[in-house]
Image: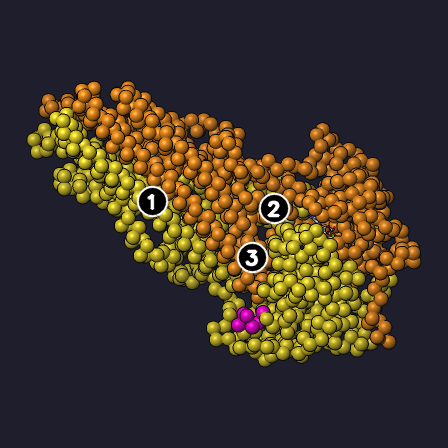
Amino acid sequence: MTDSVPTGEDWRGVATEDTDDLPPGAGIFLRDRSRRLLGELLRPHRRSLWWLLATVVAQNVAWLAGPLLIGVGIDVAVPALVDGDAGPLVWITLAMVGAAALDTGLRFLFLTGSGRVGQAVLLTLRRRVFTHVQVLPLSFHERYTSGRTISRLTSDVEALAELLDEGLDGLITALFSVLGIGIVLVVLDPPLGLTALLGFPALFWVARWFQRNSTAAYRRTRETIAALIVQFTETFGGIRAVQAFRREPRNDELYAALNEDNRQAHDRAFWLIAVFVPAVVLIGNLVTVAVLGYGALRVMDGALAVGTLVSFLLYLRRFFDPLQDIAMFYNSYQSATAALEKLSGVLEERPTVPEPTDPVPLPAAAGELVFDDVRFGYTGTTVLPGLQLTLPPGETVALVGTTGAGKSTLARLAARFYDPVEGEVRLDGVPLHRLSDADLRRAVVMVTQESFLFSGTVADNIAFGRPGADRAQIEDAARAIGAHAFITALPDGYDTEVDKRGGRLSAGQRQLVGFARAFLADPAVLILDEATSSLDVPSERLVQHALRTLLADRTALIIAHRLSTVEIADRVLVMEGGRIVEDGSPAELVAGTGRFAALHQAWADSLV
Amino acid sequence: MDDAAAPDDRGRLSALLRLWPYARPYRGLIAVTFGAALLATLAQLAVPLITAALVDGPIADGDRAALVPLLGLALLFGVAEAGLFFLRRWAMTRSCLAIERDLRGALYERLQRLPVSFHDRWPSGQLLSRASSDMSTVRRFVGFAAVFLAVNLITCVVVAVLLLVTYWPLGIAVLLTTVPLTVLGQRWERRYNVQSRRVQDEQGELATDVEEAVQGIRVVKSLGRRGLVFDRFDTKARRLRRLELDKVRTLALLWCVFELHPQVTLALILVGGAFAVSTGALTVGGLVAFVALFTVLLWPILSLGWLFAFAQETASACDRIGELLDEPLTVTDRPGVVPRPVGSPARLAFEGVGFRHPGPAGPVLAGVDLVVEPGETVALVGATGSGKTTLTSLVGRLHDVTEGRVTLDGVDVRDLPLAQLRGIVSVAFEEATLFSMSVRENVTLGRRDATAADVDEALRVAQAEFVHDLPWGLDTRIGEQGLSLSGGQRQRLALARAVLGRPSVLVLDDPLSALDVHTEALVERALREVLAGTTALVVAHRPSTVLLADRVALLDGGRIAALGTHSELLAGHPAYRDLLAQESDLAEVLP
Ligand SMILES: Nc1ncnc2c1ncn2[C@@H]1O[C@H](COP(=O)(O)OP(=O)(O)OP(=O)(O)O)[C@@H](O)[C@H]1O
Ligand SMILES: Nc1ncnc2c1ncn2[C@@H]1O[C@H](COP(=O)(O)OP(=O)(O)OP(=O)(O)O)[C@@H](O)[C@H]1O
Ligand SMILES: [Mg+2]
Ligand SMILES: [Mg+2]
C-alpha cells in the first residue's frame, strides 16, 4: 500500500478513520461511498419525492400569487370601489384568501410528507447500521470501541436528520425560485439578464472552494464528536474507579482538550460558511451594482424603460436571497455527507466471521466438539499454537491452567466468536463456519467470564436465554441453580429492575442470573468460563448439584480455578501456554505426578 | 425521567435563561452579532433608496457623471452588507461554539462528581444524549435561531409602529389580527415543547439500547440473541419515529398558522384600505405605502413560527441538561473541611453503621460495628448478597452511610476532604475496572506521581509482570475495559493499581477470584508483605484468601455476626463453617 496506485480496497470500511490527511483519491472514494448510501436510502421513496416536489412547486406558485393579486387589487379593485363597484374587490379578496388557503394547505402536506420520508429514511438507516454492527465480529468491536459505534448510531444519524429536517424544504423552494426568477430576468431584458448571469461563474468558483475545504473540515468534526463520546462512555462506564482513584481532575483535563478540539473543528467548518455565505451576498450585490450602472446607461440611451429597470432590480434581490438558502443547504449537506461517510464505512466492514450462505442444517446436535489442529492468535500473537482435542458427546470436561494460558480463548473459538487462523472447530463433524447462526447458537452456549446483564427485570434477563419462555420456566431455571431464593427476596421478585449493568444486584447474584440465563437456553454444548468465581461456597455447591443433573446428557466444557468444580468432570485438561499438557480422568491425574497433581495438592492444602 | 416534565404556567421559554451564565462571558461577541445583524438589515434598505435616487436624479437628468458617485455608494453599501454578514456569522460562530464547549464541559465535570448511586440509577444513554444531541440543539439555537428571533421580533415591532403612523385605524386592525395568532401559536408551542421532550427522552433510550447492545455483544453473540436485541432496538426506533412525526405535525400546524396569517391580513388590508380610500380617509399612495410596509413583514412573521418552535425545543433541551446540573452532589466535601492528620496505617472503625438504598428495599446493613486496628488485616466473609461490597464502598465514600459512621483514626470519613480520603483509601473492586489507556496509566490511575520503582513493585506484588511481555511493555494500550487481557490478567492489574505506593488503608473486594491456585499462592505471598504495613479489609469467599487476614468478620443479616481468627470461627460458628468449609467430594472419591 506504499507507493502503488491507491485502490478503494485500502480505504475500505473504517480504515480511514484514524488518518487526518487523506490522499486525494481517498477523499473522492469516501464521498462517492457516502453519496451512494444516501442514494440507496432515498431510492425507495422516489415516488414520494416527486410528489413532494410537485407539492412544493404548486405551493410556491400560490405563495407568489399573493403579492401579484394585491397589485391588481390596488390598480383595479380600489378604483372600482371608489366608483361604487365592490365586485372586483370581493373577487380579488376571495382570490387572495383562496391562494393563501391553498398555499397553507399545500405547505402542510409538504411538511408532513417530507417528515414522513425523512423519518422513514432514518429508521431504515438506524436498522441497517444496528443490524450490521451486531453481525460484525468481536475483533471489529475490540478495535473500534463501543463509544465510536455509539457515536455513529447517535450523533451521525442525527446529522442526517438535520439535513432532512431543514435542508430539503429550503433547497427545493430555493431552487425553484432561482430557476423561475432566472428565466424571468432573461426574458424581461436579455442584455441585463445576461449581465446578471455573469455572477454565476464567480458563484461556482466560491462553491467549489467551499466544497474542497469543507469536506475535510466536516469529516474532522465527526471524528472529534466521536472522541468526546468515547471519553464520555468510558468515564461513566467506570465511574467507581474514576472516583475511587481521584481521576476526576485528570479526566476534566482530557475532556476539556477533546472538547476544545471539537470546538476548533467546528470553528473551522463554520468559518468556511462564514466566508461562503457573505461571498454569495457580495457577488449578488456586485452584480446588482453592475446591473444598476449598465441599466441606468441603457435607460439614458433610451433602450430601456425605467419601470423595467426597477422591477428587474426587485427580482434580482429575490434571485440572490434564495442562493443564501442554497448555500446553507450545502452546509447541512456537507455535514451529513461527512456523517454518512462514517456510517457507510461501518456498513462496508465485512463480517469476517460470516454466516455461511449455504449452511449445513443441524437441527439437533449430539454435541461432539472437535478442535482439529487449531491455531489461533489475536493480532500479532499466537495464543493457541496447535490444538488437537475431541470432546465426545455428553462428556463433562474441566479445563484448568494458569491465567493467560488461553482457556477463554479456546472457549471463544468453540462459541465461534473468532474463526481459527488454521484448522477447524467441528460440531458433530460439521465445521462451525458451515453452520447457520441459529443452529450454532442453539447448540453451543457460553457463559462468559464477564457477566453482563441488560437493563430490564430479573425475569427479562433470564428469559434472554430463551425468548418466549414463560414465568414457570424462568422460575424453574432459577430454582435449579439456587437463585430462586434471593430473587423472591427482592422487593418485586422476578420483576425487580436490575438497573444499569445489573448494578442492583451483587456480583454473585449477577453471576447466578447469568447462569440461569444459559441454563434456560438448554444447549447441547455448554461452556462455562469461570461462571461461579464470585459465588460463596454454599451457592457454588448448589450450582454444582444442579450441574450434575443438567450436564448428564450434554457436552460441557467447564473452565475453573476452584478445583472443587472439577470434581463433577469426567475428564480434566490442563492447559499451559496454549497447549494441553495433561489429559485424563481426575483420579488418574491426581494420582500422577504432573501439574494437576501439584495443583490439586496445593488446593487441598488451602482448604480448611 | 420518562415522562416529559409537566408544563408549568410560566412561559416555558424561561428554561432558556439557564443559558445566560454560560453566555455571559461572551456577551461582547453576542452584542457584535446583534449589532451586525441590525446594521445589515439597514444596509439592505440602501439599494432601493439609491435606486430611487438614481431614477429621480441622474437618469431623469441624463447626467452620466452623477451616476458614478451614486453607483460608488451602492457598491459601498453592497460591500458593507456582505462585510456585516461576515462579521455576524463570525461572531456568532465564536460565541455559540464557546458556549457549547463550556456547557458540555460543565456537564461532564458535574457528572463525574455525582455519586455512584446516581450513575447506577440513570441509564447511560440518557446522560450521553444530553451531552451530545441536546448540546447541539442548544448550539444551533444560540448560533442561528436566537439572532433571527430577536431581529425578526424587532423588525415586526418597528414595522408595526410605522404601520400605526401611516394609517392608525388599519394599523390597529392589523395588530388585532395577531391575537388569534398568539393564542393558537401558544397552544401549539406548548404542545411542541412537550413533544420535543418526548423525542429527546426517546433518543436517550435509544442511545442506551445501542450502548448495551454494543457493550453486551459477547452475551448477545454467545446466546445468539441478535434478533431479540434488534427487536428491542427496533421497537424504540419506531416509537422515536412516531414521536418525531407527532412533532412534525405540530410544527406543520404552527408553520401553517404563521404562513396563513400575513396573507389573510394582507387581504384584510386590501379590503379595509379600499374602503378607506373610497371614503377619502386614505390616499391610494398611502395604501400602497401601507401594503409595501406590510410585505416587509411577510417573511419575519412566517419564520417566527418555527423560530419559536425551535426555542421551545431548546428550552426542553435546557431542561434536560439542567436536570443533571441540578442533581444534588450528595457525596461531597462538607463545607469548611480541611485535611486532617491521619496515621499511616490508620485505624478503621465502623460504628453502628447502617446503609439502605433509596427505594422500597430494606436496609442492606444495620448496626455494623467493626474495628480494624492499624496495620491489621480483617477478612470480611458473608454469603452472596450479604452486603460485603456495600460495606467496603462506605470506606472510600462511594456511598455514604445512612446511619452511624465510619472513622479513620477517630475522624469521621465525611469530615475529611474527599481528595484526601480517597488518597488514603485504595481499593480493588470485585470486577476489575480498566480503561483503554496504557498499562502504566491504568496502574498509576490514583497516583500519577508514582515512580517507576513503585510501579514495578506493585506489579511484582500483584504478579502482573506479564505486562512486560506485551508488545510495547508498560506502554501497551489495553483494549476497552481491559477486554484484550485475560480475566486473571485484568484482576492482577487492578490489584497492582490498588497496592501501588503502599496505601495506608487498603480495601480488596474478592481480589483473587480469577486466579489459578499457583498464581494465587504467589500473589498471596507477595501481598502479605504489603498487608503487614497497611490497614486492610479483604472480602473473601475462599479459605485461602481468608488466611491472609489476622482476623475474620462474618457478615450476616446486615451485621457482624462473628469476629475472631479463622480457626476460632471454624470451631465456634457453624454458619461460618458452612460458608467456608469446602469439604471436597473429590477428596473422598480419591485415594
Ligand atoms: N481480545 C484479545 N485481544 C488480544 N489479546 C487477547 C485478547 N483476549 C485475550 N488475549 C490474550 O491472550 C492470552 C490468553 O488469554 P485467555 O483469556 O484465553 O486466558 P485464560 O486462560 O482464559 O486466562 P484467565 O484464567 O486469566 O481467564 C492472554 O495473554 C491475553 O492477554
Ligand atoms: N441499588 C440497590 N437498591 C437496592 N438494593 C441493592 C442495590 N444494590 C445492591 N442491592 C442489594 O444489596 C445487597 C448487598 O449487595 P452487595 O453487592 O454488597 O453484596 P455482596 O456481599 O458484595 O455480594 P457478593 O458476594 O455477591 O459480591 C444485595 O442483596 C443487593 O441485592
Ligand atoms: Mg479466562
Ligand atoms: Mg460483592
Residues under labels 2 and 1: Cα distance? Answer: 39 Å
Query: Is residue B24 at least partly visible in the picture?
Result: yes
Return the chain for callout 3.
B
Q: Residue type at mark 3?
A: Ala
Residues under labels 2 and 3: Cα distance? Answer: 17 Å
In this rendering, is residue A308 above or below B588? above
For residue A198, side relative to residue B113 (left or right): left
Q: Residue type at mark 2?
A: Trp
- Residue B532 x/y as whole percent: 84, 49
Determine which residue is flagged by label 3: B213
How packed is label 1: few (under 14 Cα within 10 Å), some, or many (20 or more)?
A: many
For residue A36, side relative to residue A252 (left or right): left
Residues under labels 3 and 1: Cα distance? Answer: 38 Å
Determine which residue is flagged by label 1: A108
Residue drawn at (35%, 56%) of the image: A45
How packed is label 3: few (under 14 Cα within 10 Å), some, or many (20 or more)?
A: many
